[in-house]
Image (tube, rainbow, N blue to C red):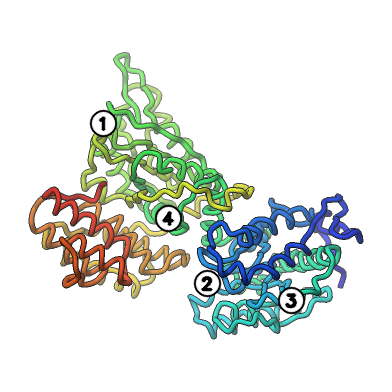
Amino acid sequence: MSSIIPGQPEFLHQEVSKESGKTSENNTVDLHSLFTQVMSNYLSAKNQPFANNPTANLIRNKFRQEIYKTGFITSNKFVVTGSPGQGNWASVPWIGIFNKSITTSATKGVYIVYLFSSDCKSVYLTLNQGCTELKSTLGKNKAVEIMRKVAGQIAAAVDSRGFLAGDNIDLKDPRELPYLYERGTIFYKEYKKGEIPPNDVLLSDLKKMVDIYDEYVIKTQEDNTLMENNDKKSNENNGEIKMSIKDIVDYIHKYISAKGFSYEDSLIKNFYLSLKSKPFVILAGTSGTGKTKLVKLFADCIGAEYKLVPVRPDWSDSSDLFGHLDLNGRFIEGALIRFIKDASKNTDKPYILCLDEMNLARVEYYFSDFLSIMETRRFENGVIVSDPLVNENVYGASEAYLEFGKLGFPENLYIIGTVNMDETTFPFSRKVLDRANTIEFSYVDLVPGESSLEEVSALADIDNDFLKSEYILLSHCDDRDYIIKICTELQKINEILKIAEAHVGYRIRDEICFYMLNNKKYNLLHEDEAFDYEILQKVLPRIQGSNSTLKDMLIEMFKYCAGDYTGLSGSDTYEQMQNYINNNQCKYKRSASKIAFMVRRFEEDGFTSYWL
């Protein structure tokens, strides 16, 4: 079988020069010295601090730079990632090359990866499969069975170009993750320490492996049986491969990090799940923590239309949002109505509206009508519709009614409010809090991440299905057993909340269920972590006051989230709780930490609330 595949871009077939380390564009590429450095230095580096270690930085950055210089691996098509570990040294460091149409993550999909053995005596160039998500979903044995099946299908369908087939590599580490790396191998070639070939051979081998990868991509477009392990959908119109939801969310995090903003990976997943569950999210925190920037970069990455609207302190009713008649009977457009109208005409594309410093005015005054209309959303023939946003009497005799009169809440409109909680702003009513996920920004990492050095392009063709709500009523949820499981836990929480008459109602129950179902469907967060976020974002923000029963209720909530802290040393309840968190595995650690903070405020001030 020829290594030249019809229809591939011409640069994929450029010849590697026999002059060591040069492509036909005369870009000097030196992989030989990088492999030699890692194999000589990695084991001793593992005895040194991980942060800013030169060997770790070499794996993360230098390999990516050299591989992009080849000319046949380009940043518009591939993501190159090196991993010496995540906060701690990995036993098996690797450098992955991911085709964006297949995957951008080592957790799933098919990709090229260099794997170093744990004793650093070998490095393997492999075509491999992500194993983490399969293992977490199906278990180790079933994951291995499926990976071997997929590897056999690919090996039978794609020319090996001289590489060995099968899972016979030996990473010299019996632990689970290296074992799964071995079992996921489709094709491979081994390079031994002290016998690393010159750069022209390394580049030639890499080029052949890229040809294999591209042939695999083309064949998967024609035969979806090769994609059993990848959870991708075929675009029926043009045969392109779409990224999975998890891959898109992972890529968004990579894109934002590349812009120099370091957010936790789980925060981006949480933000996505919050928007997916309901198109209204509040981002709270002190000024300068990157709330507005997160919204802008998220929108940029997925190609959404974006509008930033600074809230004015004098806004007092919905006319500031939608419009009003002046003294001459002319309709004066509000700050949002034109953007909402545009969204209603382009429903395939997400429209993201950021209300900046949302609580400079009283939210329940100017936003109350909007919140009420949001609750009228419903499915009609698969489309989400709502009641009209503006009463027709507002337009008077003006022609504006012809343009805006029947305008509802479009299914592709997503509203994010950023808020600062200080003496210059207004608190939220429960009406507002009940209708949003409130995500608090309390941690800022001022040191740029390593990925901020990487060029990461925005995604294209992310349509509204990515963010569109799948559930509006609990009856829309098809996983009945899972709903009962979540509601049973919420019932336990509600019994505790009743101590202080702070129990939640059906709206919060439904929206937590939607969040948890979306998380289960797309496998973004561990179930306990997802439920922890929902306690933190949907339950705790509603709690405030000075009644003595409030402290009793918070203590019981802490026991539910973390455990029985009583009996530990400490000068007060807060200190006991904090000692428990520091020394024990808490099921819902984020919520437990917030509850401890709220208890401290109560003990110091006789009053408490969720907000800083």
Placement of 282 over or under 523, stated as above or below? above
Q: Earlier in the sequence, mark 4 or mark 3?
A: 3
Q: Earlier in the sequence, mark 2 or mark 3?
A: 2
Report the residue at 42% width, 53% height from top: 271
Report the residue at 34% width, 27% height from top: 323
* Residue highlighted by disc 2: 133
Looking at the rendered structure, the secondary structure element under dot 2 is helix
Residue 585 disc label: none
Mark 1 residue type = Asp
Marks 2 and 3: CB-CB under 8 Å?
Answer: no
Q: CA distance from mark 2 to mark 1?
A: 48 Å
Name the quadrant of the N terminus: bottom right
Q: CA distance from mark 4 to mark 3?
A: 36 Å
Is residue 16 among the parts visible in the rendering?
A: yes
Q: Earlier in the sequence, mark 4 or mark 2?
A: 2
Residue 317 disc label: 1
* Residue highlighted by disc 4: 267
- Name the residue furthest top: 328
**Crowdedness near tag 1: few (<14), some (14–19) or many (≥20) residues, C-alpha within 10 Å:** some
Residue 187 disc label: 3
Looking at the rendered structure, the secondary structure element under dot 1 is loop
Q: CA distance from mark 3 to mark 1?
A: 65 Å
Q: Earlier in the sequence, mark 1 or mark 4?
A: 4
